[in-house]
Image (cartoon, rainbow, N blue to C red):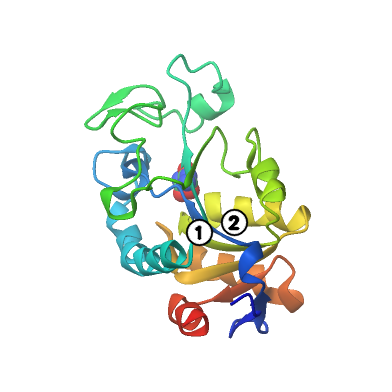
Amino acid sequence: KNAEIRVPAEPYEFTFDPTRVALLCIDFQRDFVEAGGFGESLGNDVSTLRGAIAPTRKVLDCFREQDWMVIHTREGHREDLSDLFPSKRDRGNPTLRIGDIGPMGRLLTRGSKGHDIIPELYPIEGEVVLDKPGKGAFYGTDLETILRAGGITHLILTGVTTEVCVQSTAREANDRGFDCLILSDCTGSYFPEFYESALHMFKAQGGIVGWVGTSTDLLTAVD
Ligand code: TIU
């Protein structure tokens, strides 16, 4: 049961010991994926991200069935905004700032409807929910401690957006010695060209940051 799993990927096969793998579902929050949230307040068309939801659900179901580690992250801030740098609050001089009240409650603020994870991918008992103040999931969190305590060496990355929180997290993980596979169909960007180039630069140079694969290849390899 603990035999190594081999997933076809680019730039070459991604192999992992199933006792040492974790799934990261990065920032599948209403604030990024649904209308009226933070993503839309920045001027983005949020419908571009929705394609990642169904394939991620299949991978999530597989991890649940196998009883492998699942970690959900949420970008956002304390209700008193004491962990929000003015640089982040004011960048771009938006009409709605983090902490302001939008159609789904306070933008990127813990406890609001918009900050929470979308129902399609909602965490269940036993899964880690990690709140983070930045784009990368390691900065200002205990993610590294959780992964090391669980003996995790390999990460499967899904989430939004590809070139912002997913890429930042992958780079942070890679520098900490974790092998990362991004599932291309389980991530999305508001900008098609950024999606393409983020995945391309990630796997270039012999996998300088990691591997890129698909959910179907992963699920077939696990079966
Ligand atoms: N703006 C954008 O593309 N993304 C973010 O601000 N956060 C995440 O990617 N989660």
Residue hosting label 1: 162
Q: Within the image, what quadrant is residue 16 found in?
A: bottom right
> Where does the image place residue 70, in percent across and percent down from the top left?
50, 54
Number of marks in picture: 2
Q: Within the image, what quadrant is residue 98 found in?
A: top left
Are the residues flagged by discs 2 and 1 in contact, CB closer than 8 Å?
yes
Front residue of 92 and 1:
1
Front residue of 42 and 141:
141
> Where does the image place residue 220, in percent across and percent down from the top left?
46, 84
Which element type, helix, strand or loop, lies under badge 2?
helix
Q: Earlier in the sequence, mark 2 or mark 1?
A: 1
> Where does the image place residue 221, in percent across and percent down from the top left?
52, 83
Q: Is any part of residue 65 visible from this angle?
A: yes
Q: Quadrant of the N terminus?
A: bottom right
For residue 119, side relative to residue 218 (left or right):
left
Please, what is the three-letter code of the amino acid marked with disc 1? Thr
Q: Which mark is residue 112?
A: none
Indicate if the residue with disc 1 has its beta carbon within 8 Å of ligand 1. no
